[in-house]
Image (cartoon, grey):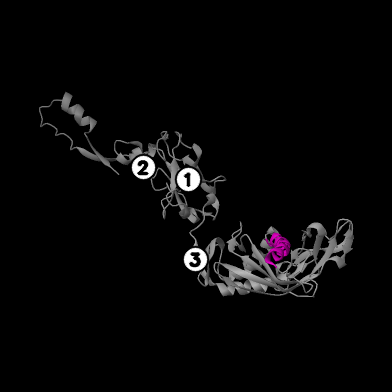
Amino acid sequence: MYKLFLKTLAIGTLIAASTVTSTAAQVPLLKPVEKQIQVNPKINPTINPNIKLAFLPDLILEKASIRLASNCRVNKPALYVHATVKNIGRATSPKRMDIGIVSARDASTGWGNGKGIPALNPGAKTTVTFPIYYLKSKPESMLGKHTFELTVNKGGWIKESNLKNNSYKPVSINVPAGHCNVQPPAKVKKINADLIARLIKGAVNGTELHLHNRGKKSGDSYHKKNASYIKLSSLLGGTKQIFNIPENKIDAGAYGWLRYYVNDINLSSFDIKRDGNRFKLSLFFESNGTELKGYHTARFVDFGDKGAPDIQMNNMRLDVYLTPAKDSRGRLTYGQVSVKFDAKIQAGGVCNFKTVNFCGSSYKRRIAKGIEDGVRAQLNNSTTRNKLAAAFAPQLNRFGIGKIVNVRIQGSYLVIEHQAR
């Protein structure tokens, strides 16, 4: 508080000094009187130099939020910031669109953006929305939890009466894996390939494979369509999938046609082991003595079952080669299937009949192709792949394996590159 001292003289003294004269001794002037007058500095800006702050704007962030952008990609927004700015001061704040008066920034990464604001009269407010863009320099750093500092006029570009109320409470948001098509850096897990082979064997155990295409005569043919099937194990869902083995028709020249049909062949056992960069699943079938039933049709005569020798196939084995792969959901599965059928073929005790060498590799290949094509088609079926991937998933989760981005066999290990789920 300032004190103003005023010195005054008695009015009567002033009059006497100016108008009265006397022969007697002159009356002395009254002694000056000091009086203290208190002045309120709040109504006198010339006395209080700080009073000028009361006539400035005062900007605050009234509310703010951050959300994920719906269509995030390179050069496009990843997040959007919404903020409401209010002027609680006693003067209009100027328009500043040339700089980010309102800003949001992640302190740990520096990721952020800002936007200017229009002029605001005392008591007025405005809501601004601005993007935080895809971080091209290090996309994976966008993923996970981010805590943003939201401020208004942090750089003091607008003169305010109070600069201590320009920050908003921290706003956090989680950016999930896959947002902006960005995935976190892959982790590498090595698992003994023999362990995976045992998992496959356990998943396949209980699977039934039935090969058959012989039926009742229709015209010259005894072919029965869709008489073969694979019935998956209970672990793989127990689904039964029907497939067809085509008729094997052989031109015997002047002797007419020989037709052979697969006759009730069933899977008896199987084994699996690592084979280079893939797994080999070997399926073994039972032998019943007449695995291929033969029929002979000449130009004008149908000799039926008596015209062609039945064929016995011993040591039947179907090798299925499975190359590790990932499916669209990042699960462990297999790629395109390679199948090879082999057996020791003997046609009724003879090798040559009606110009056909049944013991030769050419005929064996013809028989094998029908079986291979039928089995391959079913194993390449998306349903079978999906069931096998679903069966593997719980086991891989126990190893801490998330979404698979790459998989391969390297030496004695299955190497899996994955991302946390």
Q: Earlier in the sequence, mark 3 or mark 1?
A: 1
How much space separates mark 1 and mark 2, taking CA atoms?
22 Å
Report x, y in % for residue 359.
Answer: 72, 69
Q: Which residue is mark 1?
A: 132
Q: Which residue is mark 2?
A: 156
In terms of secondary structure, where does tag 2 sit?
loop
Q: Give the camera-side residue of 152 and 313.
A: 313
For marks 1 and 2, give the one nearer the viewer. Answer: 1
Q: Magenta stretch: residue 137 in it?
A: no
Q: Give the camera-side residue of 223 and 19.
A: 223
In terms of secondary structure, where does tag 1 sit?
strand
For marks 3 and 1, give the one nearer the viewer. Answer: 3
How much space separates mark 2 and mark 3, taking CA atoms?
49 Å
Q: Quadrant of residue 383?
A: bottom right
Q: Quadrant of residue 337?
A: bottom right
What secondary structure is the magenta-colored segment mainly? helix
Q: Quadrant of residue 403?
A: bottom right
Residue type at the position of mark 2? Gly
Q: Magenta stretch: residue 367 in it?
A: yes
Q: Is residue 70 left or right of residue 23?
A: right
Which residues are the magenta region?
Answer: 360-379
Q: Which residue is mark 3?
A: 188
Q: Earlier in the sequence, mark 1 or mark 2?
A: 1
Q: Give the camera-side residue of 35 and 129.
A: 129
